[in-house]
Each structure stands twice: as C-alpha cells, then as structure tokens.
Image: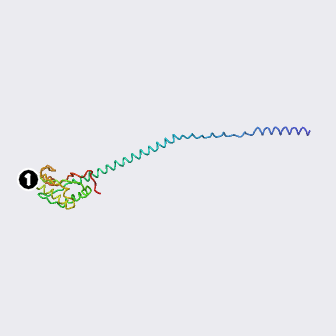
Amino acid sequence: MHARIRSLALAALAVSAMTTTACKKKPVVAPAPTPVVAPPFNQDSANAAEAARRAAAETAAKAAADRAAAEAAARLAAAVAAAKAEFAMPVYFDYDMSNIRDDQRATLEAKLPIFAANPDMRIRVAGHTDNRGSDEYNLALGQRRAAEVKRYLVTRGIAEDRIDVVSFGEERPAVAQDNEDAWGKNRRGEFEIIAGANPFKLPR
C-alpha cells in the first residue's frame, strides 16, 4: 500500500516537473548589431577637396579686391573731376571794371590748393567782356581783367611764369543774348590748364 502511494506520488511529481518545464518561455536573444565599417580614407580625394576650397577662397578674395579697387578708382576719378571743375570756375566782373569783386575772391582762393598740389602746373587766364563797346576797347578790357586775375594769384604766392594771360574781348560770349543776366555772365575771367598737371593731383 505504501509502495503504491509512493509510486503515485513520484509519478505526480514527475508530471508536475514536466509541466513546469514546458511552461517556461525560452529567452529572446537580441541579434548582434551590425558593425559600422568606416569607408576607406582616400588622400587624393581629400587633397582635391582642399585644393578646390583654397581656389574658391582665392577667387572670392580676388573678386573682392577687384571690386574695392574699382570703387576706389571711381571715387578718385570723381574727386579729380570735381577738383578740375572747381579750378575751371570763372570769376565775374562788374560792367566796365577789371578789379576783383569781393564776392569773387573765394573762387580764386579755392584754386590755390590745386596750384600747391600740382607745382608744375601752368594755366592760361582768358579775359572776356560783354558786347557793349568797340572791339578794340573790349579786347583791352578783357586783357586788363585777365591781368588782374594773374596779379591776385601772384600776390597769393603763385609764380608769375605759371600764368599766361589772353583776351578774347566780346568774341566768345558764354551766353549769346542781350540782357543784363547774359552780360553779367559774359564779363568773366576763365581758367585753362595748359601744362604740368597730368596726372592731376588732388589737394591734401
């Protein structure tokens, strides 16, 4: 009897053990990560890329330098044109007069720095009149006006041999009309650079 009970107990124990084993889940094993393989290093490609980068940087730098040079040249040309225009500004005279008017002195003073910046420059001062009076009288009046301009500049330190004078009288009017406004614009002294200012230097 005891032997039978023992056998049944052992059998039940074996069945229980088999059931327990069968119910256990197998562990999930994660797949091994795929190794990342770095591409082989190519020195020739690296050198080519660096050379291209340097070439692009040099091209950009040259373009910037060219732009800066062009802008500087344009500014210089504009400044030279403005200085030449200022130097060419005429002085005006009262009717039948050759003395320098007080309101025209600033025009002459503005020319002095240009003379100083261009020490080899020589100019011609041309005297003009309106069309009233005889041709002979107006030629003489134009000569006196040009001479008075020269005298003023010489007193301000400009050498006499740097200034020539000529008179055109009434022959070359600035405004070909017969009225007070036109006459006032025709009574003038004009300035022309004739030598020694190529290249033209700007005052400092």
Question: Is residue 66 found left or right of 147 in the rendered image?
Answer: right
- Nearest the viewer among 96 and 189 is 189
Question: Is residue 80 found left or right of 155 in the rendered image?
Answer: right
- Nearest the viewer among 94 and 83 is 83
Give the image quarter of residue 86: bottom left
- Nearest the viewer among 1 and 76 is 76
Question: Is residue 114 found left or right of 130 in the rendered image?
Answer: right
Classify mark 1: helix, strand or loop: helix
Instruction: Tell me residue 96's x, y (percent).
Output: 11, 57
Is residue 56 depicted above or below 159 in this figure? above
Instruction: Tell me residue 65's x, y (percent).
Output: 38, 48
Is residue 14 depicted above or below 193 in this figure? above
Question: Is residue 7 found left or right of 71 in the rendered image?
Answer: right
Q: Give the labeled residue for mark 1.
A: 136
State the quadrant of the C terminus.
Answer: bottom left
Q: Residue at x 8, y 53 (%)?
A: 136
Q: Residues within 10 Å of mark 1 (few under 14, many from 20)?
A: few
Give the image quarter of residue 164: bottom left
Instruction: Tell me residue 80's x, y (percent).
Output: 27, 52
| Amino acid residing under circle 1 | Glu
Instruction: Tell me residue 97's x, y (percent).
Output: 12, 59
State the quadrant of the N terminus.
Answer: top right
